[in-house]
Image (tube, grey):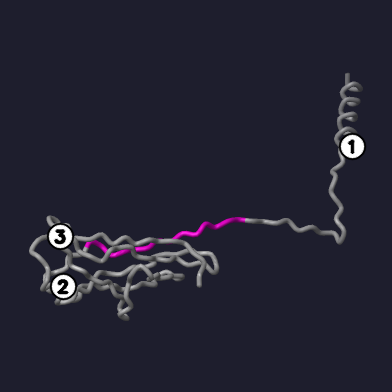
C-alpha cells in the first residue's frame, strides 16, 4: 500500500512540475498597457430669481447669472443667452405693456444678440432691469409681468 501511495504522489509531483507558464516575448523586453478613463463635463449655473420692480423705478437690480461650479473640457465654455420680448404685459389688457431693457453692469444691452460665455467657476454677469420714465408715465394701472428665459448651452469657447 505504501508503494502505491508513493507512486501516486510521485506521479502527482511530476504532473505538477510539468506545467509550464507561458509569456509573450516582446522585442526590447517591455510592453506598455494603456489605461483610460472619461470625465463628463459638469456645471451649475445660477440665474436671477423672480423680481418685483417698484413703480417709477428707473433701474432695478435683477441679480446675477453665475457659473457656480464647472468641470469643462479644454476649449469649451458654458454660454448663456436670454429670450424675452422685453415687455411687461398687463394682466387684464393684452395691449397695455411697459417696455423695459436688461443691461449688464457695464451697460451692455442684454437682448436677442447677447451671449455670455463662462469658462471658470465664479464668473458672473450682474443684470439690471431698466424702465424709462416715459414708459412709466404711459403705463395704465394694473398688474404687469413678463417671463425672461435663460438658455444655457455647452459650446466651443471663442
Residue 14 x/y as whole percent? 90, 33
- Magenta run includes residue 38: yes
Given this view, does label 1 or label 3 mark the residue nearer the observer?
A: 3
Vertical placement of 4 versus 77: above or below? above
Q: Nearer the viewer, residue 158 or 90?
A: 90
Q: Earlier in the sequence, mark 2 or mark 3?
A: 3
Check if mark 1's residue and mark 3's residue have beta carbons within 8 Å. no
Check if mark 2's residue and mark 1's residue have beta carbons within 8 Å. no
Residue hosting label 3: 90
Q: Secondary structure at mark 2?
A: helix
Q: Residue at x 87, y 53 (%)?
A: 25
Residue hosting label 2: 135
Q: Which label belongs to residue 156?
A: none
Residue hosting label 1: 18
Q: Earlier in the sequence, mark 2 or mark 1?
A: 1
| Residue at mark 2 to residue at mark 3: CA–CA distance | 13 Å
Residue 143 x/y as whole percent? 12, 60
Give the magenta range.
Answer: 37-50
Residue 81 x/y as whole percent? 38, 65
Q: Secondary structure at mark 3?
A: strand
Graded by Cα atoms within 10 Å as few (under 14), some (14 to 19) or many (20 or more), the crowding at tag 3 reads: some
Q: Residue at x 45, y 71 (%)?
A: 120
Q: Residue at x 15, y 62 (%)?
A: 96
Vertical placement of 113 versus 10: above or below? below
Q: What kind of secondary structure does the magenta stretch mostly adopt?
A: loop
**Quadrant where the N terminus is found in the figure:** top right
Given this view, does label 2 or label 1 mark the residue nearer the observer?
A: 2
| Residue at mark 1 to residue at mark 3: CA–CA distance | 93 Å
Check if mark 2's residue and mark 3's residue have beta carbons within 8 Å. no
Amino acid at each position: 500500500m505504501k508503494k502505491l501511495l508513493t507512486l501516486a504522489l510521485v506521479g502527482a509531483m511530476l504532473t505538477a512540475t510539468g506545467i509550464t507558464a507561458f509569456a509573450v516575448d516582446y522585442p526590447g523586453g517591455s510592453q506598455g498597457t494603456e489605461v483610460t478613463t472619461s470625465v463628463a463635463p459638469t456645471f451649475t449655473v445660477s440665474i436671477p430669481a423672480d423680481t418685483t420692480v417698484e413703480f417709477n423705478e428707473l433701474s432695478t437690480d435683477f441679480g446675477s447669472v453665475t457659473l457656480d461650479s464647472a468641470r469643462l473640457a479644454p476649449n469649451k465654455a458654458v454660454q448663456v443667452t436670454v429670450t424675452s420680448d422685453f415687455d411687461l404685459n398687463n394682466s387684464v389688457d393684452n395691449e397695455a405693456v411697459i417696455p423695459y431693457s436688461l443691461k449688464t453692469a457695464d451697460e451692455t444691452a442684454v437682448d436677442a444678440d447677447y451671449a455670455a460665455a463662462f469658462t471658470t467657476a465664479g464668473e458672473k454677469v450682474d443684470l439690471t432691469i431698466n424702465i424709462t420714465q416715459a414708459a412709466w408715465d404711459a403705463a395704465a394701472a394694473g398688474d404687469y409681468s413678463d417671463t425672461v428665459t435663460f438658455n444655457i448651452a455647452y459650446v466651443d469657447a471663442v
